[in-house]
Amino acid sequence: MKNLILITISIAMFLSCSTLKKGEKSVEETYFKVELVQNGKLVKEKNNVIQLKKKPFKYKLTLIKTKDVFVSNSWGTHYYDYPETENIFKCDEESAEGINEICRFVSIKTGNEDRFNESKDIYVGDQTYHGVWFYDENIDWYRMDKGVTTKGGIVHAEVTVENIYDLDKRDERKYEASEYNYPIEKINQDIYVVFATSHYEKGMEYPKELQREKFILKFK
């Protein structure tokens, strides 16, 4: 009986240590956090879906161990369906058209969004574009709403979404401005969202993916 008790205690201690190590590893790998807020309340994700009303909302960003995140808000799944086992920052293609069709997050595809999100919108398109939301204390502007704060090296920022800027329709050059730049109340499609951050240093062939988060925004 005494030996059985000792074995049970040993197993419990081992499992406890293993759980702690897994928890510590999870914390270490959290470079950023993204949340959705609408009407002042956090909207939780369920089965990779965040259900929103057709009203303004906010991305709430916490940059913990990075100063930037790449973000794709898209009508399609070019970014969303990219395998989690692959590096979403890898791009071996050289032609401009090939980069759009084959590669995902690569700097040359970054859209030129408003400083301080003055238009209170997000760019939504196909695989041709994505954004980079960053904060650098040595640069006097950023893409997020004014009022970014830092505490203990952690960056807290928000991106207010009152309007949609549809890059697909704009690029087709057959729509009026009001048809590709419109208030969120007029949205009638899901948005596939992907956030990711990376690390790059001289000598690396391409950046190393550090963390990726994805979900689908549905509106009602």
Image (tube, rainbow, N blue to C red):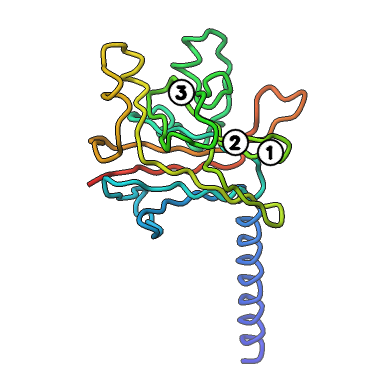
Q: Nearer the viewer, mark 2 or mark 3?
A: 2
**Who's the residue at 57% across and 28% down the image?**
89
Nearer-N-terminus badge (1/3): 3
In the displayed structure, would residue 195 be above or below residue 37? above
| Tag 2–tag 1 contact (CB < 8 Å) | yes
Q: In this view, does 49 lie to the left or right of 202?
A: left
Q: Mark 2 points at which residue?
A: 142
Secondary element under disc 1, as helix, strand or loop, is loop
Residue situated in front as seen by the camera: 64 or 28: 64
The amino acid type found where label 1 is placed reads Asp
Q: Mark 1 points at which residue?
A: 136
Nearer-N-terminus badge (2/1): 1
Secondary element under disc 3, as helix, strand or loop, is loop
Q: Name the residue under label 3.
A: 129
**For residue 160, which quarter of the picture?**
top left
| Image coordinates for residue 201, horizontal then vertical, percent | 75, 29
| Image coordinates for residue 12, horizontal then vertical, percent | 61, 77
Secondary element under disc 2, as helix, strand or loop, is loop
